[in-house]
Amino acid sequence: MTRVVRVGDAVIGGGSPVVVQSMTNTDTADVRATVDQIRRLQAAGCELVRVAVPDLAAAQAIREIKGEVMVPLVADIHYDHRLALAALEAGADKLRLNPGNIRDPKHIQEVARAAGDRGVPIRVGVNAGSVDGRFRGSQGEITPDGLVDAVLWEVDLLETAGFRDVVVAIKAHDVPLTVEANRLLCQEGNWPIHLGVTEAGTEWEGAIRSAVGIGILLAAGIGDTLRVSLAGDPVREVEAAWEILAALGLRQRGPSYVVCPTCGRTGIDVPGIAAEVKRRLSPIVQPLSIAIMGCPVNGLGEAERADFAVVGGKGFGTLYAHGKVVRPKVAEEQVVAEFAALVRQEVGEHA
Ligand code: SF4
C-alpha cells in the first residue's frame, strides 16, 4: 500500500479513491480566465488542478486564484527552482518538479525545505520527452529503467533533505514504456503514484491511449491519482478520467451509459437519443446506470439491470425505471424529453 499524501483537502494514496486531476491551459497570470477554467474543471469533477508556472507573474497569480476556487492547486515548475519558491509563497498546495530540467541538488533541496516548512507535497514528475541525458542509454535511448532512475535520483535528494511528502510519476507518449516504467517504479518504494500517458494526442486518440495505459496500471492496482492528457479543452480530460475509473469499477460520478452499437434491427435513433440524453443529464453527479438500446434483443436484459432504460421499437421507445416498464410506447421524437424528465424526477434534488 502506498503512503498517504495530503494536498489541501485531497488525499492521495494509502488506498484512498483514485484522485482525478487535470491541468489548465490558460495563461496562469490571466487570473480571470484561469479561475473560469478551474471552475469548469471542478464542476466536471476535477479534484486537483495543476497550473503552469512559467514565470514570476504566474507564480504570484496563484495567491489570487486560490482566493476564488475551492479545489487544491498544483504549481507546475520547470527550469527555475525560484519559481517553486515563489509558488509556495503564493500558497500553492503542491509542487510538480521535473528532474529533467531542475538538476542542481542544492536547488532541489532548498525547495524541499521550503515545501516541508509549509507541509506542501512535491510530485517528482519524469517525462520521457525531457528526461536528463544521464538517465538515457548509451545511444540516447529512453528505457523504463532509466525513467525510474530519474525519479529515484530526485526522490533521494528530497528524502535526504528530510522531505517525505512525495508523489511520483513517469509519463511517456509510448504506452508500453509508460506501463513498464510504472510497474518498475512501484517496486522501488511506497510513494503514491500519479498516472498518465503524456502528449497522448487530441481527444479521440488521446482518450484511447490514456485508457489503455492508465487502465492497465489501475487494473493491476497501481496508481493513486491520474491525469488524462488531451490536446484541447481540459474538461474533456476530466470526463475521460471518470470514464476510465467507471469502466474499471473503481469510482463513478454521474450516470454510466450502456448504449447498443446499433444494427439492422435498430428501431430508433440510438446515437442521437443517447447523445442528447447524456447532455441533458450531465448535471447529475450521483452514480446511475442508464441503458439506451435499439431493440429488445439485448435491450430487455440491459433494461432489467439498469436503473433507467430506453428500449427501441419501430419509431417508438419503451421507458424503464428500475427494471420495470413505466411508459410502454413513447413516440421517438418524445423519447429524449420524457426519459430525461423521468430520470430527473426520480433522482430529485440530486439533478
Ligand atoms: S440491441 Fe438490438 S438494435 Fe441494438 S445492436 Fe443489439 S440487436 Fe441491434
Image: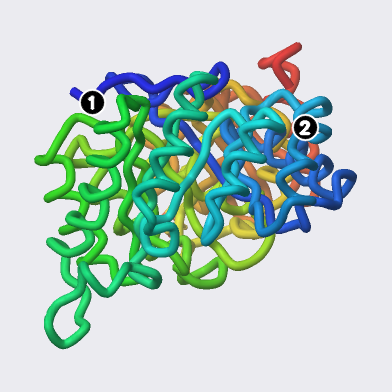
On whether ligand 1 comes within 8 Å of the CB at mark 2, the answer is: no
Front-most of residues 66 and 135: 135
Q: Position of residue 239 (x, y in %)?
A: 57, 46
317 vs 134: above or below: above
Q: Nearer the viewer, mark 2 or mark 1?
A: 2
Label ID, residue 63: 2
Q: Image quarter for residue 210? A: bottom left
Q: Is residue 305 left or right of residue 143?
A: right
Instruction: Determine whether label 2 and label 1 are within 8 Å by CB.
Output: no
Which residue is drawn at the image coordinates 78% and 57% (left, top)? Answer: 27
How crowded pointer 2 is (Cα within 10 Å; few <14, some 14-19, many 20+) is rated as: some
Front-most of residues 339 and 191: 191
84 vs 284: above or below: below
Give me the C-alpha separation between circle 2 and circle 1.
31 Å
Q: Position of residue 228 (x, y in %)?
A: 48, 53
Residue at numbered disc 1: 2
264 vs 194: above or below: below
Q: Amino acid at mark 1?
A: Thr
Q: Position of residue 261 (x, y in %)?
A: 45, 61
Front-most of residues 275 and 59: 59
Which residue is drawn at the image coordinates 67% and 51% (left, top)? Answer: 24
Quadrant placement of the N terminus: top left
Q: Secondary structure at mark 1?
A: loop
